[in-house]
Image: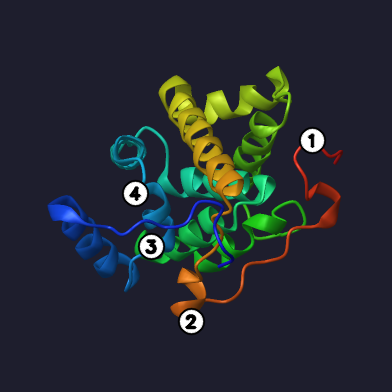
Amino acid sequence: MTTTRIPAAPITGLYGALVKKFAGKMFGRVPESLGVMWHHLPALKASMAYGQKLQKWDECDETLKTYAHMTVASLIGCSWCLDFNYFMSRDKGLDEEKARQVPNWRAATVFSPLERQVMEYAEAASMTPPEVTDEMVAPLLAALGPAGLLELTSVIGFANLTTRSNVALGIESEGFASACGMKPLAERPADRAAVGSPA
């Protein structure tokens, strides 16, 4: 991980001890990104609380939501979120080979038609301006239903919040997946390496 744009603060106090204990169990160490966010505890708590609420929703398949978040992370260039979601895919019982191919989803042959539609939607919703079309939404609405599509869209919106914030703050991958011996993530093709670039 390179130097963040805001230096990490010491994680202190009773809440800090709980956070460090939780992080240690999940990652084996305390991520530097937590120290960066520690400068503003209300912002950190709000982001964590909303992320935890998203995890409890069950109107949309967990695999689809994970692929959507990873697609946004790959598009925006957030190596932290991409690595974290790939790392967590093992705990969620997801197909590890599929998860590692998300950055290259357009060329990869491992994804189902619905998974590809979800990732296309995640990218389109994350463009500036958004490029979502009626034709893109129709099959997702049919497959997921209104509640499922709303949940997926909320996950994509939250992914944009976290990925863009991390990139702006210089928070990059801390190597969670590689530390667990997981294969390197597939490379994202250069033709869509930047938000807003043509397909």
Q: Is residue 192 positioned above or below 25 on the image?
A: above
What separation in Å lies between label 2 and label 1 (alpha carbons)?
Answer: 34 Å
Q: Is residue 121 positioned above or below 162 on the image?
A: above
From the image, tell me which residue sits under label 3.
Answer: 93
Residue at the image position 46 percent from the left and 24 percent from the top: 150
Q: Earlier in the sequence, mark 1 or mark 3?
A: 3
Q: Percent position (x, y) of residue 26?
A: 30, 65
Q: Earlier in the sequence, mark 1 or mark 4?
A: 4
Which of discs 2 and 3 lies nearer the camera? The answer is 2
Would residue 136 be visible to someone looking at this image?
yes
From the image, tell me which residue sits under label 4.
Answer: 38
Which of discs 1 and 3 lies nearer the camera? The answer is 1
Residue at the image position 58 percent from the left and 29 percent from the top: 140
* Horizontal side, residue 192 vs residue 110: left or right: right
Q: Are marks 1 and 4 in contact (CB under 8 Å)?
A: no
What separation in Å lies between label 2 and label 3 (alpha carbons)?
Answer: 16 Å
From the image, tell me which residue sits under label 2.
Answer: 181
Residue 196, disc: 1
Q: Percent position (x, y) of residue 61?
A: 42, 42
Q: Earlier in the sequence, mark 2 or mark 1?
A: 2
What separation in Å lies between label 1 and label 3 (alpha carbons)?
Answer: 33 Å
Q: Earlier in the sequence, mark 2 or mark 4?
A: 4
Q: Is residue 74 positioned above or below 142 on the image?
A: below
**Crowd class of label 1 (few under 14; some 14 to 19; many from 20; radius 10 Å):** some
Q: Are marks 2 and 4 in contact (CB under 8 Å)?
A: no
Helix, strand or loop status at disc 3? loop
**Amino acid type shown at disc 3:** Gly
Could you say which quadrant of the image residue 188 lies in? bottom right
Residue 56, disc: none
**Amino acid type shown at disc 2:** Gly
